Amino acid sequence: MQDLFTSFSLQVNNRVYIKNPESSALGRKIVESSINLIDDVGFEAFTFRKLGLEIHSNEASIYRYFEGKYKLLLYLTSWYWSWMEYRIAFGLANIPAPEERLDKAIKLLTENIELDGSFEHINEYKLNKIVIAESSKSYMTKEVDQNNKEGFFAGYKQLVGRVSDIILEINPTYKYPHMLISTIIEGAHHQRFFAQHLPRLTDAVNGEDAIIEFSKEATFKAIGAKRSTK
Amino acid sequence: MQDLFTSFSLQVNNRVYIKNPESSALGRKIVESSINLIDDVGFEAFTFRKLGLEIHSNEASIYRYFEGKYKLLLYLTSWYWSWMEYRIAFGLANIPAPEERLDKAIKLLTENIELDGSFEHINEYKLNKIVIAESSKSYMTKEVDQNNKEGFFAGYKQLVGRVSDIILEINPTYKYPHMLISTIIEGAHHQRFFAQHLPRLTDAVNGEDAIIEFSKEATFKAIGAKRSTK
DNA sequence: CATTTATGATAGTATTACTATTATATTTGC
DNA sequence: GCAAATATAATAGTAATACTATCATAAATG
């Protein structure tokens, strides 16, 4: 885990913003309130004008931080994946068995996120809801190739790569590690949404978090490995 | 398969439209051109005004068929799932072994769609691309519960239910059939998008359609069944 | 052939997604 | 502690979007 730890930093590609929102009180306010507002009204109805009113600031000022709401969403999701990698790096530290590391990584990737208050201006609980419901709108666009070239999805790709490496440690011949992990991540997010809004597309099971259980079971079976008993 | 066959009909919930676009030449033109235009410019940049120009008709006339572009998207995706159920109903007819039926259903759900020209005004190839890139925008909205109440997702839910039933036929104790199938469907769509735009999130394998193979393998392993040799 | 119905043309409104300009704070460097 | 630089606020403006309304005309139907 040494390499995970040392190469880690909770940073967002500096091209998603014009001015780093971490660099000022207004910037942090923009990020903080955008999370509340997007969670509240949804990304479609979210506008910089409304955000300006919410924080008693000015629409034009927000445009000095972000080119538009899609870039802000990209900022939020990039931050999220960077944070997720941080959680995983710490969560897996000093666990030698790759099976146990994979098990824990999947749990961290698919579990419900609680508010933990580690970051002043970021509500992780709401951010997770936003990532679930809105993040696909940040890459399912006509600008995806351009954005990808600029490195906006680097954090997500790196995270998928890291977890895929654990899979290959367990089973070096498994052919689809990236597919499996990206499917599990996106799938778990979809399932959380479905559980809330379209329950006929999921299966609730008493006494367990079915989404975590399903994700772990499917992953280990797919790669032909035994789940760690721990 | 008898029940699939008899209960099947290629219809879209009549509440997604104001006037049935199948009922007039203009309506069919709207549907046909909307597929081309959304495929071309993406759903965000797609407007009824542009569509009106494209078909040399009037914005206001389009509003007499659909309340807005989200409803049109809902129409297109509903049509797609209805069509997919039709494909599956016919594709599985007279196959007695549930393993073989499941295998084929997954293929039909996850394969690349070619233009087959069965429907005058619908380009299945482009519609598939739209479903892949845009369909989540039809339910990842603040209106999802309202829309669900009105039955807009019935076709999709029914399809997932049907395939889940095959799983339960093979393994009646499997706990997550709906999760598995909805994950496979959405996952395969995501993977098709990633393969095009974010290849580091997938795994290409020479000489096979890795997305179909991955989907089948993951499904059968998840439910603990042997894939049919056929 | 008259009447209903569908479409077209035009215009209008509120909101969105910005950009520009200028004024006023606030910070920083000396 | 002050000048200069920088950040923010206030206001206004533009083009486009997402509609709605009205009226005229064309097409279908009984």
Image (tube, coloured by chain):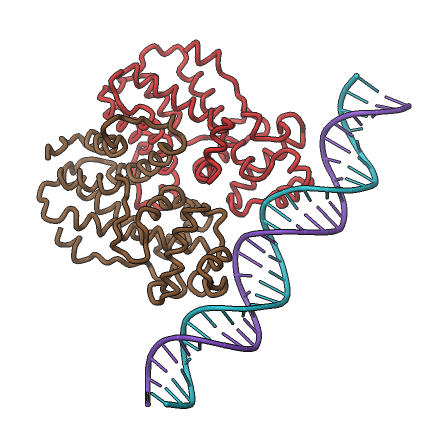
Chain colours: A brown, B red, C purple, D cyan
> Image quadrant of residue B120?
top right
The C terminus of chain A lies in quadrant: top left
Nearest the eye: B144 or A20: B144
Total count of labels: 0
* Residue D14 % position (x, y): 63, 62
* Residue A145 % position (x, y): 41, 50
Nearest the eye: B125 or B61: B61
> Image quadrant of residue A183?
top left
Nearest the eye: B194 or A70: A70
Q: Is residue B39 left or right of residue C1?
A: left
Position above or below: B98 against A23: above
Nearest the eye: A185 or A46: A46
Q: Residue at x 36, y 64 (%)?
A: A20
Q: Is residue B108 left or right of residue A120?
A: right
* Residue B78 % position (x, y): 50, 28
Q: Residue at x 16, y 55 (%)?
A: A5
Q: Residue at x 40, y 44 (%)?
A: A136
Position above or below: B105 against A55: above
Position above or below: B48 against B165: below
Q: Residue at x 45, y 51 (%)?
A: A143
* Residue A166 % position (x, y): 17, 42
Q: Is residue A226 left or right of residue A191?
A: left
Position above or below: B143 against B92: below
